[in-house]
Amino acid sequence: MDEVLDQAIVFHGFADYMRDYDVYIYATADPRTGVAPEHVRYRFVHAAEVVAASAVAPDVWQRSLDDRLIEYETGVDLDGYVWCVKWQALYPGMRMADTSAAADRWSRTLGIPFFEARVETNRHNLTVELPRPGGVGPMVA
């Protein structure tokens, strides 16, 4: 997950069968490398709990409720957060946490070890509670 630092998240949500949680990233490299941009899906398997919280500061939210801010043409000259770019900067990035209050609660409830994946962007911060298969590490595909 360290390899996708500072890339663009273009979508996140549950898979269509509603068990696993997907984060879609548009990954790019310096054009001089010759590496072509690509869409990459990170699938968090057996996502027992997902929380998406705003990373936008409350005072900015307060100025950003006008629906004109969801389109560049109508929001560019307004005082508020212009939501329209249709992607989020994956920064400071994605990481695994061995423990969290939610992971501990799931571990106690189900009797198997859980951990937490954290996805932090300039718009939303996600936490995903996942079982640790066989106690050996994250189950991310």
Image: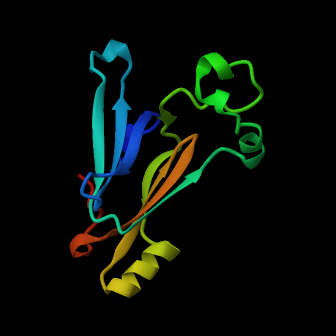
Q: Residue at x 38, y 49 (%)?
A: 13
Observer-nearest of 98 and 124: 124
* Up/down of 61 relative to 32, above or below: below
Nearest the camera: 99 or 66?
A: 66
Please give the name of the residue rendered at 42% of the width and 69% of the height, measured from the top-left corner. Answer: 98
- Tell me where residue 136 appears, x and y as whole percent: 25, 70
Place residue 69 in its image quadrant: top right
**Horizontal and vertical percent for residue 127?**
47, 59
Question: At 68% from the left edge and 32% from the top edge, which residue is drawn?
Answer: 81
Q: Residue at x 70, y 34 (%)?
A: 66
Residue 129 found in image quarter: bottom left
Residue 19 location, x and y as percent? 28, 62
Q: Is 14 on the left or on the right of 80, as rendered? A: left
Name the side, left or right, on which 2 lies relative to 126.
left
Q: Is residue 45 above or below residue 136?
A: above
In the image, 20 versus 74, the foreground residue is 74
